[in-house]
Amino acid sequence: MPEPIVFISHAAEEKDIALGLREFISTAFAAKVSVAISADYEAAAATREWLVGAKKAIETCRYAIVLCSPESVRRMATAFEAGAAWMRGAGLVALCHGGIEPGRLQPPLAFLKAGNLFDAHRIGAVVEEIAKAVGVETPRVDAAAFVDRLQRATGGAPKLEIISATYGTGKDRFDVTIPVRRNLTKQGLQLLASNATLGATGKSGQKELTIRYAINGVEDTIVVKEGEVAMIRLRQ
């Protein structure tokens, strides 16, 4: 394999995710970018051969991805690999999943640029950052389709969480988080914004429904006017 330009640090439990990321990146850059993953050296784990192999891969990489899960953040080699890439001055990002949130990483991983593994925008940004690190044009990719395939492959069905919801106008707004949550289904949310459906009072025609939600930890907001339908669909 040519000298790696991208290195993916991961725990043994994340091997399939790392392989999927490698295929996605290699395909996106038409195989012009060589990608190494921790599993390339797993046969030599806990030996000097692993140290030499990983060291060589990191020394030649220009961009490193650190997968952060409950398993990997306890893996000593994760901090070792991330630290080596950082010392080298390579581009570096932590992609979190499995219940680990970007804002809750502990040092030294907390000092890295971090995002959610299942955030299509973050994956698209990673492609842009790799292109910049390598000095090539950013390829066009369908990051949303990749995230969808990755979720299916890892058995990670999309999870929708309603963080908060308000309904009204200006300062005259009602907290309708509970009634909105009651309308969640396996397909997502489809809810008419009205006094009747949200248990609100007051004059009709001027209110707005604002819903703050997260899909697999990635937050977003939707705003609809009274009489319109708030719709959040999950890919199944």
Image (cartoon, grey):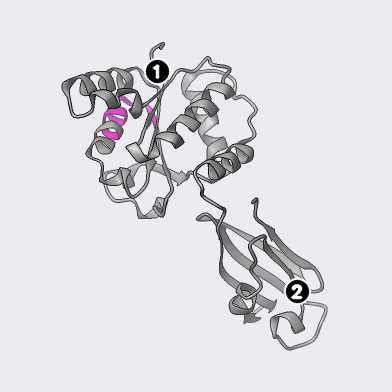
Tell me residue 3's x, y (percent). Answer: 38, 13
Residue 223 sits in quarter:
bottom right
The number of numbered discs placed on residues in the rendered structure image is 2
Residue 152 sits in quarter:
top right
Q: Amino acid at mark 1?
A: Pro
Q: Amino acid at mark 2?
A: Ala
Q: Earlier in the sequence, mark 1 or mark 2?
A: 1
Nearer to the camera, 178 or 90? 178
Residue under label 1: 4
Residue under label 2: 193
Please check the rendered image and state whether residue 89 is part of the magenta-colored stretch, yes or no: yes
Outermost residue, top side = 2
Tell me residue 156's x, y (percent). Answer: 51, 50
Tell me residue 47's x, y (percent). Answer: 17, 24
Secondary structure type for disc 1: loop
Residue 166 sits in quarter:
bottom right
Residue 113 position (above or below residue 101): above
Predominant secondary structure in magenta?
helix
Nearer to the camera, 208 or 235? 235
Residue bounds of the magenta highlight: 82-91
